[in-house]
Image (cartoon, rainbow, N blue to C red):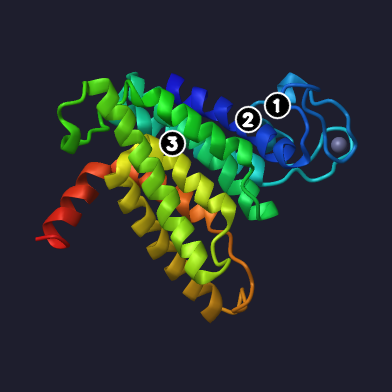
Amino acid sequence: MIVLLFGLLFGSFANVCIYRLPRHESIVFPASHCPSCHKPIQWYDNIPVLSFKLLQGKCRSCRAPISWRYPLVELLTGSLAVALFIKYHFTFFFWMYALVCLVLVIITFIDLQEQIIPDELSYGLMVAGTIFSFFNRELFLQIIFYFPLALNRLVASYVGLLVGGGILYFIAWISRGGMGGGDIKLAAGLGAFLGWEYTLIMLGLSFLAGGVVGIILLITGLKKRKDPIPFGPFIAAAAITVILFGEPISAWVSAHLFG
Ligand SMILES: [Zn+2]
């Protein structure tokens, strides 16, 4: 219950970032205001999900509709926090992946709306990933067993970063712009947390999901062949899948794809 509330509050913060980061506004000041009438929002109208329901999705003073994105993002971060808690309890991994998931939700919605992934978020992931790597016992690299453990993890983190960024960079290069710089930096940042093995699985899943959704969008006529489809949300969804279900997926991949 506490975890859910915590996740919902994370969602409120995510909403602020989704709105303000692409506009280059400060995320701490001023306090939340209605984007339509600019009246400050009182704390009792800013309670995750509940306020949206009570206000029937409209601003209290000007009645302008409030975007569905707000309760959706809050429910998303709320359920992610619960899922992470079920897997990791209150360990170091819970906090580390809660931070990663928060950034991924923010990136997903910014990329969907603006077709960009803010550099500060991807660079933030790269820096945080390398710092966290010292405590990240899921990162391992057996080849350099003679290094001290912490150094092994740091190297493993950098290898993940290079694998994630490198593969997408290569695809961007051969496809001549089919992949954006934002996607490359995002995959590199996630690679620093996940290590090379999970990064490869993450990229595989994101291409699979992107391909399937792309074909559906083309068949249903929602998108035309030349329309850009943001790839960031697919990377984000694949990364969250790997964070939550990495072990069974990795076991399946090694059993079925590599005998
Ligand atoms: Zn208003």
Q: Residues within 10 Å of mark 2 (few under 14, many from 20)?
A: many
Identify residue type, mark 1.
Asn
Which disc is residue 163 wearing?
Answer: none
Label annotation for residue 80: 3
Precedes in sequence: disc 2 or disc 3: 2
Residue 34 on image: x %, y %: 82, 34
**Element on which disc 1 rests:** loop
Amino acid type of disc 2? Answer: Ser
Q: Are marks 2 and 1 in contact (CB under 8 Å)?
A: yes
**Rendered view: 92 above or below 202:** above
Quarter of the picture holding the C terminus: bottom left
**Where does the image place residue 237, in percent across and percent down from the top left?**
44, 50
Q: Splitting the image into four quadrants, where does ligand 1 fall? A: top right
In the rendered image, is residue 74 in sight?
no
Check contact, mark 3 vs mark 1: CB within 8 A. no
Label 2 belongs to which residue? 12
Count neighbours of disc 1 (C-alpha within 10 A) and say few if under 14, some if 14 to 19, many if 20 or more. Answer: some
Q: Which quadrant holds residue 147?
A: top left
Say whether mark 1 is within 8 Å of ligand 1: no
User: What's the CA distance linking mark 2 and mark 3?
Assistant: 14 Å
Q: Which mark is residue 46?
A: 1
Q: Nearer the viewer, residue 150 or 10?
A: 150
Cα gap from disc 2 to disc 1, whole angstroms: 8 Å
Q: Residue at x 72, y 46 (%)?
A: 67
Q: Quadrant of the N terminus?
A: top left
Residue 229 in view here: yes
